[in-house]
Amino acid sequence: MRNKFKFYKLSNIENFNYKALLIIWIQYILFDRFTELSNLNVSLIHKRGAVRLIPIDIIFNDFISTSFLYILKLLVLVLLIFNLINNNKNSLYVLITLVYFYELIKKGFGGHLDHRILTLYIFTIIVTMSLNNDFSNSKQAFSFAYLFFFLQYFFIGTARLFSGFPEIFLDDTFKNWILQRSLRPNFFNLQFGLKISEYINLEYLNIIFFSSTLIEVLAIGCIFYSKKYVKYICTLLILFHIGIYLFMAVNFIENIFLLIIFIRSINKDLLDEKIYYFR
Amino acid sequence: MIDLINNYREFFLRGVFESIFLFIFFILIVKKTNIVKIFKSNKNTNLLILTFFLIFFMQVIDRFQYFYPQKFDLYPFARFAMYQAAPDGVELTSYRFCILDEADNCRIINISKVYSTIGLPSLSSRMKYLIDEFPSTEKEIEYWLSSLERLTIENDKKIVFQKIELENSKVTTLNMVEVNIEK
């Protein structure tokens, strides 16, 4: 009985990250107002990826039917809940395929591809493809996914440094971005950005901007260095994400969840402290 | 693409240096760490290598990803970059959807809430495109306006797409396209 209990406990611990990942997806899909897209003319869709091959405008007459959007959303939710109960790799692949089209329909009505869900999506793809069929190597699968996760922060930071150093950290570019984002409509109509750019000196704003860029570059160290380093860098990244939401209205809640899971995993030994190391 | 490279030569050259840096970084990671050994220990090594290759490849190739519409993409793989240098400067412009009643009072429709599913950054860049490419986007704007007709009430007369500009702390509004509400 004692052994059985221990085994039960262990299997739960090992699967915790995987289940948490599914819950992040569930909250995203559940609160997503996906069916609103049935009000937009189908000719507004800019086709991307595999959707280029699908004659959406011929399949749907003027508007994508609400029932189609409901069914797609429901299917994704059902698959997520199914995977929450059972560990099944094939259904995870089906889920990834459905989400691919789900996201491309949404992004078809938008402009550029933003990173909010791209990160979570690629993260999930990497976890899925690197998991064994019996899900026995959760630790390893998540170590690959987190390699990508911190790599994307590193990419974002280096892209900013190479494209704009030192000018954008000295002039009023950052202040203008804050103003512009506050001027544009956002979900809660937050306008803290207008206030902050009014009351905080340009120099201080630029110091914050430059520091956050350095933290993004240093984020890659989270997969190489000790617990202490991880805690500081991940906490700062979480704070920056909260700041970006308050002052620029860009939501990165899924990244915050992934960062929290990472800190927890390192503390609870769900991920090795130094998976990757310098030889 | 060639036009963009010519127009944004400095931006492009900086991109070349960034790519060289990423390439050196990649070589260092492969040579100096245990990453290859860990990749090889997985059953799906080839797929994993392909995925990470695509992530690196798009980071180097997918320049000008904020320009809309794009002719080529490898969704879900896209370059990770945000708040990078703005070669044309940051335009202090915005947009607004307004429902006018019979007395011409404006009731603002929060488009980012109505279509929150699209995602704020993506929606904003689409709206910027509608403004920048006007008047060729007039028909598109009409479609966006018509989709909001369901939010009107009895005394409403028109729905308007407006461009907002901030200059010297002063906000100005310009009506771009309007549609009459069919009763």
Image (spheres, rainbow, N blue to C red):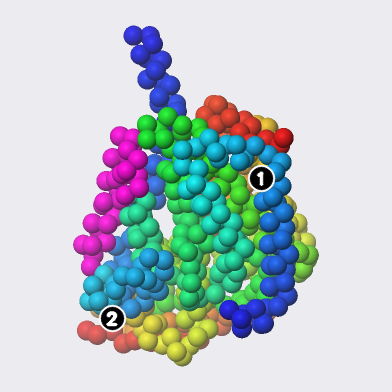
Would you say residue A148 is visible in this rendering? yes
In this picture, residue A239 sits left or right of residue A202: left
Residue A40: image location, x then y, percent: 32, 73
Residue at 48% x, 75% y: name it: B71
Residue at 41% x, 15% y: name it: A6
Q: Is residue A153 magenta?
A: no
The chain letter for the residue carrying disc 1 is: B
Residues rendered magenta in the picture: A65-94
Residue at 46% x, 33% y: name it: A138
Three-letter code, disc 2: Asn
Please state, as top left, top right, bottom left or bottom right, where the N terminus of chain B lies in the image: bottom right
Q: Badge 2: few (under 14), some or many (20 or more) residues near its Cα, within 10 Å?
A: few
Q: Are marks 2 and 1 in contact (CB under 8 Å)?
A: no
Dominant secondary structure (helix, strand or loop) of the stretch shown in magenta? helix
Q: CA distance from mark 2 to mark 1?
A: 67 Å
Residue pointed to by mark 2: B155
Q: In front of the other: label 2 or label 1?
A: 1
Residue A135: image location, x then y, percent: 40, 33
Residue at 68% x, 62% y: name it: B19
The chain letter for the residue carrying disc 2 is: B
Q: Say if B22 sits above or below A198 in the image.
A: above
Please state, as top left, top right, bottom left or bottom right, where the C terminus of chain B lies in the image: bottom left
Q: Say if A69 sits above or below A88 in the image.
A: below
Q: Badge 1: few (under 14), some or many (20 or more) residues near its Cα, within 10 Å?
A: some
Three-letter code, disc 1: Val
Residue A244: image location, x then y, percent: 59, 56
Q: Which mark is residue B8?
A: none
Indicate the secondary structure of the residue bearing disc 2.
loop
Q: Nearer the viewer, residue A234 or A243?
A: A234
Residue pointed to by mark 1: B30
